[in-house]
Amino acid sequence: MKFGVVIFPGSNCDVDMIYVLQTVYQQQVETLWHKDTSLKGCDFIMLPGGFSYGDYLRSGAIARFSPIMEQVIQHAERGGYLMGVCNGFQILCEAGLLPGALLHNENQKFVCRNTFIKAATTKTVITRIADTTKALNVPIAHAEGRYFAPKETLDHLQSNDQVLFHYCNKNGDVEPEANPNGSVLNIAGVCNEKRNVFGMMPHPERAADRELMNTDGCIVFDSILNSLL
């Protein structure tokens, strides 16, 4: 398994993602610059968090047109695995690879703190071994993380089991008080219909090292490797 981590001007979580994949999980990792026109044989592409192109216009709106994205989109259309975290999730929505949009947080403020989420499905490679009753303590850091989609899209996401994670309280209850940004239905992540493109706002790579005394995010990486290796 060869992972590719795309780096845009303004990416600031690329090193975190590379560290977890390369050092914690001992996987082969290739860095992909936004001007590259090749994925260099990578099997699983990661779009990390940050502020690509300074978040001008809308978060992810400019990055969506980077030269590398032509190959990223083709990779996804061929059934290749692709995951976006935070700003990466925003880019995937802007590119039309995932349904919905990420709007400004309901409180109109940047939110950076630990929050609880729980997996809504085990039918994807990033949630395959997750316990859907267990709350996971995973950091968020965003100003535009409020997931929104029209009712018909939300109905389809739910009926097709495409919601990956919900924000919840420490007991695993999905309730309005546990929603950090106003996301509709407390949605913290979704996938596409083919289940090969994934997006989530919380940062699992920031909760995947024993040195940080939090490994709740490991469930994502453990699921990927258990599913695909």
Image (tube, grey):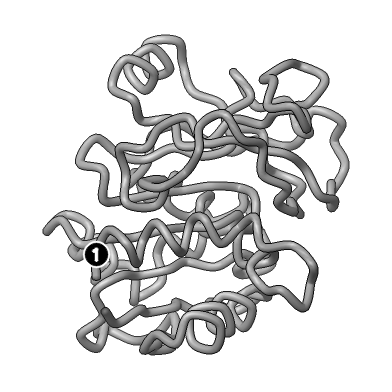
Which residue is located at x 54 percent, y 57 percent?
85
For the N terminus, give its image quadrant: bottom left
Name the residue that disc number 1 marks: 228
Q: Is residue 164 above or below residue 184?
A: below
- The quarter holding residue 80 reads bottom left
Left or right placement of residue 139 versus residue 29 in this view: right
Label 1: how many Cα within 10 Å (few below 14, some 14–19, many 20+): few
For the C terminus, give its image quadrant: bottom left
Residue placed most toward the observer, 146 or 18: 18
Q: Is residue 176 above or below residue 83?
A: above
- The quarter holding residue 4 reads bottom left
Which residue is located at x 34 percent, y 76 percent?
67
Residue placed most toward the observer, 152 or 204: 204
Which residue is located at x 55 percent, y 82 percent?
24
Left or right placement of residue 75 versus residue 175 in this view: left
Q: Residue furthest left?
A: 78
Q: Position of residue 20 (x, y in %)?
A: 56, 78
The amino acid on which the numbered mark 1 sits, given as a three-letter code, is Leu
Which residue is located at x 44 percent, y 62 percent?
222
Q: Position of residue 35 (x, y in %)?
A: 40, 85
**What is the number of callouts on the image?**
1
Residue placed most toward the observer, 74 or 118: 118
Q: Position of residue 115 (x, y in %)?
A: 77, 42
Left or right placement of residue 150 versus residue 188 in this view: left
- The quarter holding residue 144 reads top right
Element at badge 1? Answer: helix
